[in-house]
Amino acid sequence: MSEAKQQPKTVLITGVTSGIGFTTAEHLHEMGYKLLLVGRDEQKLISVSEQLGKEAYYICDLEHTDQIEGIFNFCKKNNIKLDGMVHSAGYAVNMPIRIFKAADMERQMRIHYYAFLELCRFFSNKKYSNDGASIIAMSSLASLTARKGSVLYASSKNALNAAVKVASKEFIKRAIRVNALLPAYVDTRMNTGLEDLVNVAERQPMGLIPPKNIAYVIEFLLSEKSKYITGALIPVSAGMEE
């Protein structure tokens, strides 16, 4: 007797309208995953949903953490039970310590850290996720390299790293794995013109990382192949030294 066909996994992805988030959504769609696309730009979000065969989407500005509960209310209303979550939404600005303002610091923390914790708080509830699910946070190698001008971005990603470590221990009873990817420079719009600012060839000998290669690692972390990996901060360095 043949085995029953396995149901496709459903994954929530933030920051899907560009960069790593979009490429990840595109790749997972190709691999047969069902998706819940989250972004703040309604027109771009609708466009991405249509490109991916009308995947479900929810408009949410993650800077406003009080909006995040709405994502999970949407899940409940539409009988969506999640098997994975990829927090790819991000924002980067480089400035020295002597000139940044509290508002600059707050925005970085809200998107990278506060939003992730709030997403995890709801995701960890049995109403919204299945046992054995996988959470992946998009951190950065900048959290380890301590480059000049990166204090806001690096600090917010370090906070994210700590949250990943703690969540991996708190969610272990439900076998929910929590990991972070720490890429070096990725070939996305956020890094457009990077060559004018730094010598990429010297700092990152293998060159800018194609976002599809990040999506491949995300898919691995969502799959059963990585079922014993949790609490890991996984660098994708392209040869950049920490």
Image: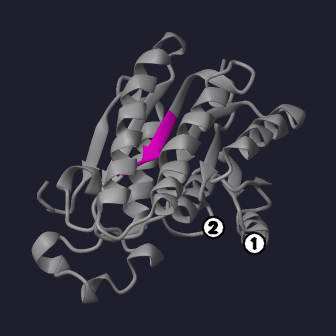
2 and 1 marks in contact (CB < 8 Å): yes
Tag 2's secondary structure? loop
Residue flagged by tag 2: what amino acid is it? Thr
Is residue 78 shown left or right of residue 219? right
Q: In which quarter of the image is the C terminus?
A: bottom left
Which is closer to the viewer, label 2 or label 1? 2
Q: Quadrant of residue 229?
A: top left
Residue where numbered disc 2 is placed: 17
Estimate the spatial distance between the alpha carbons at disc 2 and disc 1, rounded to whole Å: 9 Å
Q: Give the range drawn in magenta.
A: 135-139
From this viewpoint, which residue is outermost toward the top?
A: 173
Give residue 68's mark: none
Relative to 214, say whether 132 is above or below: above
Asked if the magenta segment contains residue 42, the reply would be: no
Residue where numbered disc 1 is placed: 47
Rendering coords of residue 209 (x, y %) = 31, 68
Asked if the magenta segment contains residue 136, the reply would be: yes
* Dot 1 crowding, Cα within 10 Å, few <14, some 14–19, many 20+: few
Closer to the chain start, of discs 2 and 1, is 2
Residue drawn 69% across the image and 56% down it: 61
Q: Quadrant of residue 162?
A: top left
Say whether residue 241 is visible: yes
Residue flagged by tag 1: what amino acid is it? Ser
Q: Quadrant of the N terminus?
A: top right
Relative to 68, say whether 55 is above or below: below
Tag 1's secondary structure? helix
